[in-house]
Image (cartoon, helix red, strand yellow):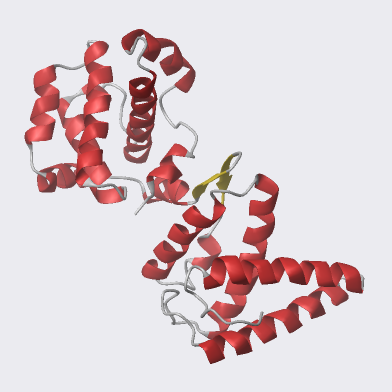
Amino acid sequence: MLKPSQILASEWAVLRLDKLEVLLPKIFVQQPERLQQAIEAIHFFDAFLGITDAAIDHAFTPRAILEFRGFLAAEVDLPTADALKIVWAVGDWLLAGGLISEEDVQFALSQNETCAMRLYQEASPLPERINYYSERFEIRDGSFAIDLSWLDSSLSEQSQQFLRERFVDYLRDKDAYQARTDVELIYSVLLGYTARWPARELSATLTPKETTTFIAEIKTESYRQMVFAGLTRTQADQNLKFVKNVIRHFFMRSGIFATVSRV
């Protein structure tokens, strides 16, 4: 499932943020918290519109509100109560614009979640657009896209989801340069991992012995590649420090590797 932060870190697909930033302050006068909540809620709605390729006139119908509720239940990792607040916030925006009635919003919220999810599936969500959001991650100074498609054939769906969830947590406090550097190193380690354990789930932590042996191999291969690329010993040692950092702070903290004392 998508993490809320992945949607909020993505670009707007259908609606115009600049227009919302002009309109919404007139609706939520001197209510900065509700204003921010409304913008975030409409960002989710925008993702739903993009994923279902909905016609703009359909977007302002009771069925679309119900489909949107189904989208949040099926695709976004949110508690039900939070999802309902998002639907209400979008409803407030549509009500203020005279685009929908309060009865329409109440009708959408009165239906059960199973019905909402069925209608969402009937809206034919586009897998490639869901994948777009699954590869967006929040970082300290904006957002960062990671192309994980090359791993799709090497990892099970469970492992793909596990990896994306770990990236959500890991990248949040990184700037763009550090995110890019670390992700390239993580890719490199994962290539070795999937070659050695092609059917293993990432959530199945390596044993301490497996971890120690594999780290030794990673260090040897990293140094070999740096020397082959013509780097000096100092440069190769510096790269190895970066590799050790992602081993400790990504692979060990995420539970892919066992925590061992020597890296």
Quarter of the image for the C terminus: give it.
bottom right
Question: Which residue occupies 44% across, 82% down?
Answer: 199
State the image coordinates of residue 17 (x, y, percent, origin top left): 46, 22
State the image coordinates of residue 117 (x, y, percent, origin top left): 18, 46
Quarter of the image for residue 25 reads top left
Quarter of the image for the N terminus: give it.
bottom left
Question: Which residue occupies 75% across, 69% down?
Answer: 241
Question: Which residue occupies 65% across, 70% down?
Answer: 188
Foreground residue among 35 and 41 = 35
**137 left or right of 175 in image:** left
Quarter of the image for residue 54 reads top left
Foreground residue among 217 and 212 = 212
Residue 245 seen:
yes
Q: How many marks?
A: 0
State the image coordinates of residue 100 (x, y, percent, origin top left): 18, 17
**2 left or right of 147 in image:** left
Question: Which residue occupies 23% across, 33% down?
Answer: 85
| Residue 104 in the image: above or below residue 222 | above
Foreground residue among 165 and 160 = 165
State the image coordinates of residue 50 (x, y, percent, origin top left): 38, 36
